[in-house]
Amino acid sequence: MSVTDAVATGVPFSTLADTVLERLTATYAPAADPERAAPMRAYMKDVAPFLGLATPVRRALSRTVVAGLPRPDEGDCAAIALRCWQLPEREYHYFAVDYLRRHARVCSSGFLPVVRHLIATTSWWDTVDLLAAHVVGALVAADPALKADMDTWIVDDDLWIARTALLHQLRHKERTDTERLFTYCLRQSGHPDFFVRKAIGWCLREYAKTDPEAVRAFLARERGRFAPLSVREALKNIGT
C-alpha cells in the first residue's frame, strides 16, 4: 500500500507505529489531569477533549516515548500520524504534529495527501498552523512541483486548507515565491472568515522580515482590497 493510498484505504502497516502508539497511550494516559483538561478544551473552543497535559509535561513524556526508537520512514510517519488522529484527545494530535515536524525530511511529495487529511480533520489553528509551516512548507520546498497543489488549495472551500496554502511559506524567507505569496493573498482578500484574514496578515508580516519594501509596495498598491485586520497584521513590525 502506498502512503498516498493510506488515507483512502486505511492506515499503512508499521511495526514502529505499533510500538510508538503502545508507548504513547501508556505514557500519556496516566499523566492526565482532568482539572486542567476542562479549561484547555474550552480555550480551544471544544474542538476536541484534552488529557490536561501542560506543554512542558507533554514534551517530556514524548521524549520518553521515542527514546531509543529507530528513525521512521515515510510509511511509519503516515501510520503514526493517522493513528494518533484516530484518538480523541488533542495531546495525541500534538504528538503527531511534533513527530512530523521532526521527521518531515524523510517524507516525499506523496505524503501530501496524508497531511491534507490531518489538516481537514478535527481542524483548528493549534495543529493546522504547525502542519502548514513545518510539514507542508518542507514538502513544497523539497519538491517545487507541489506548488501546483498549493494553487488548488488556496481556492479550496475548506478554510483550513486555504489557510495552509497562505501559511506554507512562513519559514521560506529568501526562498519565498513572492509572486505566489502576493497572488494567494489577493485571491483570498475578500474571505469572510477571521482565520483566513488573519493568515493573510501573518504571512505578509513574516515575509516583511525578509523584504519589507516589497510588502510595503504591495500594500500601497492593493491595501484597499484587504480587510483592516489583514493590513494591520501585515504592517505590525514595519509601519506604513
Image (cartoon, grey):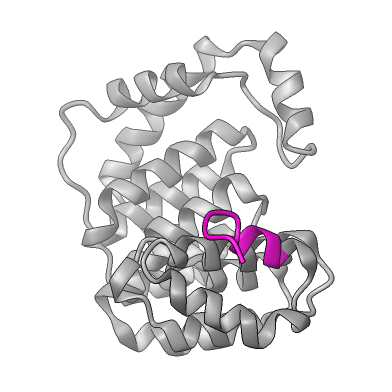
* Percent x, y of residue 188: 70, 80
* Percent x, y of residue 199: 63, 63
- Residue, far front: 240
- The residue range painted magenta reads 230-240
**Is 151 located above or below residue 194 in the figure?**
below
Q: Residue at x 75, y 76 (%)?
A: 226
Residues 105 and 13: in front is 105
Q: Residue at x 74, y 78 (%)?
A: 157
Residues 67 and 38: in front is 38
Q: Does residue 2 appear in the picture of this structure?
A: no
Residues 94 and 180: in front is 180
**Is 35 located above or below residue 183 in the figure?**
above
Residue 183: within the magenta? no
Residue 232: within the magenta? yes
Q: Residue at x 67, y 80 (%)?
A: 156
Q: Quadrant of the C terminus?
A: bottom right
Q: Quadrant of the N terminus?
A: bottom left
Q: Residue at x 71, y 9 (%)?
A: 35
Residue 146 appears left or right of 226:
left
* Percent x, y of residue 149: 48, 85
Residue 130 appears left or right of 61:
right
Q: Does residue 65 appear in the picture of this structure?
A: yes
Residue 146 appears left or right of 237:
left
**Is 138 located above or below residue 64 in the figure?**
below
